[in-house]
């Protein structure tokens, strides 16, 4: 007795697909629909219930602009009660803002340059060989993970 098999080309992956009635919880801070030339970020407006105007002002000076709720109806959010940013999207002390992508790319490049300069400075200070108290024969720039003891 041989068993009849379904030809491979007739097999589908429907059985392994996620059931259509599955549920995924909504995120607390949804992402707006992407827009060409803009990047989005949630900016802190409150800390422990107290307004953080210094931080908000700094973010605005860096180029971040509050996003109008009417521009993103897909988010369907109720803004914080008593928000000082009426008509904008604010949730839990975080304000949705957008900025020009080119400007934010320049900002990222600026901070990467600062980090590179700091690493270069550390290397120059660490690798100098004029301190007889700390001779460096073979500086090693790798990381190793070792375990203690054996089973």
Image (cartoon, rainbow, N blue to C red):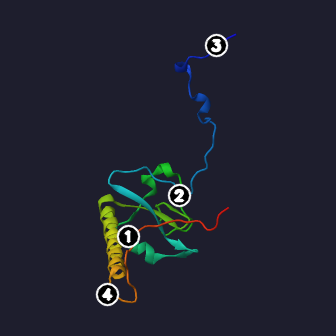
Instruction: Kindly report the distance in space between the C-alpha atoms of the residues bearing marks 3 and 4.
Output: 82 Å
Q: Tags 1 and 2 in contact by the CB under 8 Å rule?
A: no
Task: Tell me if mark 3 has few (under 14), some (14-19) or many (20+) residues whose alpha carbon lies within 10 angstroms of its own.
Answer: few
Q: What's the residue at 43%, 67% (across, down)?
A: 142
Query: Which residue position is annotated with label 4?
Result: 130
Of tags 1 and 2, which is closer to the observer? Answer: 2
Task: Tell me if mark 1 has few (under 14), some (14-19) or many (20+) residues whose alpha carbon lies within 10 angstroms of its own.
Answer: some
Query: Which residue position is annotated with label 3?
Result: 4
Please tell me which of labels 1 and 2 falls first in the chain. 2
Query: Which residue position is annotated with label 2?
Result: 29
Query: Which residue position is annotated with label 1?
Result: 60
Q: Nearer the viewer, residue 131 or 24?
A: 131
Please tell me which of labels 3 and 4 falls first in the chain. 3
| Secondary structure of the residue carrying numbered label 2 | loop
Please tell me which of labels 1 and 4 falls first in the chain. 1
Q: Nearer the viewer, residue 22 or 77?
A: 22
Instruction: Kindly report the distance in space between the C-alpha atoms of the residues bearing marks 2 and 4.
Output: 53 Å
Instruction: Kindly report the distance in space between the C-alpha atoms of the residues bearing marks 1 and 4.
Output: 47 Å
Location of residue 140 in the rendering, given as x and y in whole percent from the top left corner: 40, 71
């Amino acid at each position: 007795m041989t068993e009849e098999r379904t030809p491979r080309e007739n097999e589908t992956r429907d059985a392994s697909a996620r059931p259509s009635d599955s549920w995924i919880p909504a995120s607390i801070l949804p992402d707006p629909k992407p827009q060409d030339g803009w990047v989005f970020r949630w900016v802190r407006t409150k800390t422990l219930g107290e307004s953080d105007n210094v931080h908000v002002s700094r973010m605005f000076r860096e180029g971040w602009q509050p996003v109008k709720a009417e521009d993103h109806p897909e988010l369907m959010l109720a803004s914080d009660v008593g928000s000082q940013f009426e008509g904008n999207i604010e949730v839990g002390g975080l304000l949705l803002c957008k900025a020009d992508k080119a400007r934010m790319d320049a900002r990222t490049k600026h901070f990467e340059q600062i980090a590179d300069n700091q690493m270069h400075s550390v290397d120059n200070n660490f690798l100098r060989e004029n301190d007889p108290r700390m001779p460096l024969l073979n500086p090693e720039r790798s990381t190793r993970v070792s375990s203690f003891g054996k089973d």
